[in-house]
Amino acid sequence: MGGVFIKPVTKLGGEIKVPGDKSISHRAALFGGMAHGETHVSNFLLGEDCLSTLRCLKQLGVSWERQETEVWIRGEGMGAWQEPIDVLDAGNSGTTLRLMLGALAGSPFTVTMSGDESLRSRPMRRVTDPLKQMGAQIMGRREGNLAPITMKGGQLQGQSFRTAVASAQIKSAIILAGLRAQGETSVEEPALSRDHTERMLRGFGVDVQSDRTVARVHGGGRLNGQAVSVPGDISSAAFFLVLGSLVGQGEIILPDVGVNPTRTGILDVLRAMGADIELLDSSEICGEPRATLRVRPAKLKGIEISGDMIPRLIDEIPILAVAASLAEGETVIRDAAELRVKETDRISTVVKGLNALGAKVEELPDGMRIQGQTTLYGGQASSFGDHRLAMAWAISGMLSREGVSVEDMEAADVSYPEFLTVIKKVAG
């Protein structure tokens, strides 16, 4: 079998400092480039997605320097952005593409954005349609739904939008366009998505108003450079929360992890399944709550995951599916059709991958049904270039009977470049 072979373990322990939050790192870089004055970002995630945002900013004329996980961005305001001489390449990053389109919608020049093969297949109309309604001129494949996308910005008019899905990327793109629009722009979601944009913009001096599932901003707001401390990414911590819950012996400590309420669905679900997870040393820095997480082995049970919980853990569903396959009883995941338009169709790929490893999983139109108490025998699984799948299959290997060979394990570099090194360390 090809790929990286991950051996089973029965005991582990230690402290793991997970890398900086991907969503917050993206926004810190982008908002620093939109701001006036210097922005200093500490604990910046060095994954390929976030580096794509920095590279796009450089093409727009924004100056920045980086030393390891420290980034200094010298912003001169959005009015100083320059028309790029080449296509802005977002790589595999949907966040880069969607948020950058929103930020550029009011710029008086033409820009073309694209990405890798995976990104060019992911839907963009839910962002491009609102930006068109506000006044941007946008062309792309399939009527602006697929990259490459070319946009000529200009005079924008604030409007009120009601989105069909709860999506922080859609909401953020509209809010960023609203900063350069006349009048008020508002976004109403069916459920509250991640609110990192609203929190961070307030830190940069913008008056963003939030009322449950509605966010509002008035045009003309000025961003001022700030110091931003990025907490550890709870989506990266999720893999170790599941591993620590299901391994035979030991405990794992995860310091300084972001516990924003719009992101802690993974904690709520694992605790409902019976996990032994404690929050220690809670604090709030730069508007984002954080804490040390301690996880110990526990016997998990199946539950139903659906409704408003889904936006709070959408990225963690692949590793939650692994946990459910080793829990007692049935787990049903519903209302997660958004997984089909991620880096891969995560419903289909997770179901096929787990079944190949010996689990019993049924694919549903908007989720999956998992029969627990399955022994994961092991075998071979592919990430299909999806970082979340690469790490989920690696954790499956550690919890399996015979180990798992993970094809395209390097996909983990998108959000966790040191993942393999860390799991070797924690396993001793």
Image (tube, helix red, strand yellow):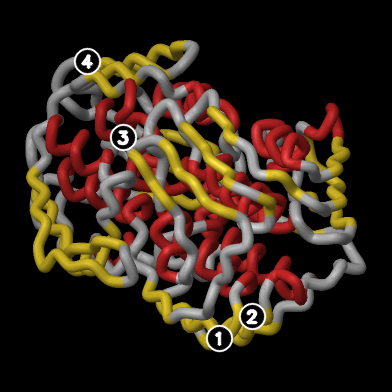
Q: Which residue is mark 3?
A: 320
Q: Residue furthest front?
A: 183
- Describe the element under mark 2 as helix, strand or loop: strand
Q: Quadrant of residue 297?
A: top left
Expressed as whole percent of the image width and height from the top left, the position of residue 68 reads: 50, 83
- Residue type marked 2: Gly
Is residue 376 rendered to the left or right of residue 166? left
**What label sits on residue 38 in the rendered view?**
1
Q: Which residue is mark 4?
A: 330
Mark 4–mark 1 Cα distance, whole angstroms, equals: 52 Å
**Mark 4 against mark 2, which lies toward the viewer?**
2
Mark 4–mark 3 Cα distance, whole angstroms, equals: 13 Å
Q: Quadrant of residue 247?
A: top left
Q: Going from the N terminus, do you reach mark 4 or mark 3 first?
A: 3
Q: Residue at x 51, y 68 (%)?
A: 28
Q: Residue at x 30, y 16 (%)?
A: 332
Q: Residue at x 35, y 41 (%)?
A: 211
Q: Which residue is mark 2?
A: 75
Residue 93 seen from this side: no
**What label sits on residue 204 in the rendered view?**
none
Mark 1–mark 2 Cα distance, whole angstroms, equals: 6 Å
Q: Residue at x 13, y 37 (%)?
A: 271
Q: Going from the N terminus, do you reach mark 1 or mark 2 first?
A: 1
Q: Going from the N terminus, do you reach mark 4 or mark 1 first?
A: 1
